[in-house]
Amino acid sequence: MKQKWFKLIWSKAIPPSKSFIVWRWIHQRLPIDDNLQRRGCHIVSWCSICRSTTKSSNHLFLSCPLAAQIWNWTGNLFSCTIVNSSIEELLDSYNQGWSPQLYEVFLNSIILEISRILNARNNSRFEDKTITNSRIISNIMVDIALSGKLSSACSNSFIEEFSIMRSLSIQLNHRKSPKMVEVTWKCPPIRWTKVNTDGAAFGSPSQADGAGIFRNTNGNFMGCFTDYFEIKDTLYVEFKAALMAVEFAKKKGWNSIWLECDSSLVVDMFKGEAEVSWKLAAKWCRCRTTLSSMDFHVSHIFREGNACVDMLAKFGVNSKTFIWWNDIPSFIHYEFSRNWLALPNYRFKNM
């Protein structure tokens, strides 16, 4: 059972809010007296370690003098306040500002300490052996150092974390430098028209606007639009702008359309891989009918390659009206020229 919990932690399947749920599942399967009594095994229960009270799981793991000394040592080790009034509070004693690596080490140390406390109970009860606190803590330190090497999470460059990890003989996992990705706008194939769409909503929901820009095979300007949508959420704006682009293309007689936007969810909707909001279901049905008589392709582009239409959408939020341009607007001329010359933009991607 302990190994199964370890695997869940190192696979990052246990967020802090779910730790107690996993512990409760483990606790129900531990061979402790209160679990045996609940299953109908009538035994005299007493603490094999302090020999002073009825042994329950709360006493064994929280209030027994051995456990209390271990939790006090843990609090000093991690420079935090360990609240051992309940298992739930014990697992929530971590510092919210800790890095993922330190949090994993802390949670693992709690598991190892619970395991060592149970092992001390078993040695005392079944083998009549008494293990000192210093030996238990020494064993815990070795276990933490060995298990800490399994973590692939990243640490922070804080001196406090460095001191804690160094005292546990665990090496810090520093964040890798981000990878630079080149993003370039590309012209559509011969006889195709590419339309880039985007939406702007300064808050969700908030004042919103959608926009699109049409370019031909040579990257030349064919037209662009922006339309104010009042108070809407981001996904609504992104998808409606794309639907409007298809309608404009049909009216203009541009029947070979390459739709490109920086919302991967909108791309999935057009591909039928994501569900369309009921608010735009009727418009989407009409759009599918329109697309059935057109050559159509849809693709995703990173925001850095969608700068022209992004500026159009932000302009539309302030103008609060529908505008169609037959000539390139002056405020997007610089970004349009960069696209036309195939000059790249860059984004950083964490490794």
Image (cartoon, helix red, strand yellow):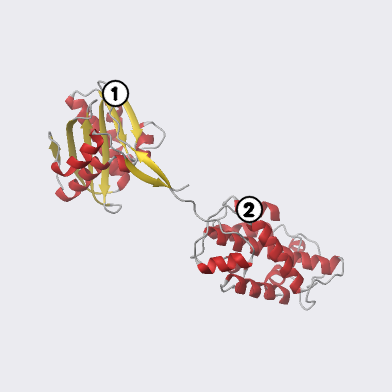
Res 322 quadrant in image: top left
- From the viewer's perspective, tell me whether residue 132 is left or right of residue 74: right
Residue in the image at 80% along x and 62% along y: 41
User: In the picture shown, does residue 200 fall above or below 168?
Assistant: above
Q: Amino acid at mark 2?
A: Leu
Q: Secondary structure at mark 2?
A: loop
Q: Earlier in the sequence, mark 2 or mark 1?
A: 2
Q: Which residue of the protein is positioned furthest toward the bottom in this rendering?
A: 52
Q: How many residues crowd mark 1 within 10 Å: few (<14), some (14–19), many (20+)?
A: few
Q: Is residue 215 visible?
A: yes
Q: Which residue of the protein is positioned furthest toward the right in this rendering?
A: 127
Name the residue tied to disc 1.
Answer: 189
Q: Position of residue 110 (x, y in %)?
A: 64, 64
Query: Marks 1 and 2: in contact by CB < 8 Å?
Result: no
Marks 2/1: CA–CA distance:
50 Å
Q: Position of residue 251 (x, y in %)?
A: 18, 26
Res 124 quadrant in image: bottom right
- From the viewer's perspective, tell me whether residue 60 is left or right of residue 301: right
Q: Is residue 279 visible?
A: no
User: In the picture shown, does residue 288 fall above or below 71?
Assistant: above
Residue in the image at 66% along x and 61% along y: 145
Res 338 quadrant in image: top left
Name the residue tied to disc 2.
Answer: 150
Q: Secondary structure at mark 1?
A: loop
Image quarter where the N terminus lies is bottom right
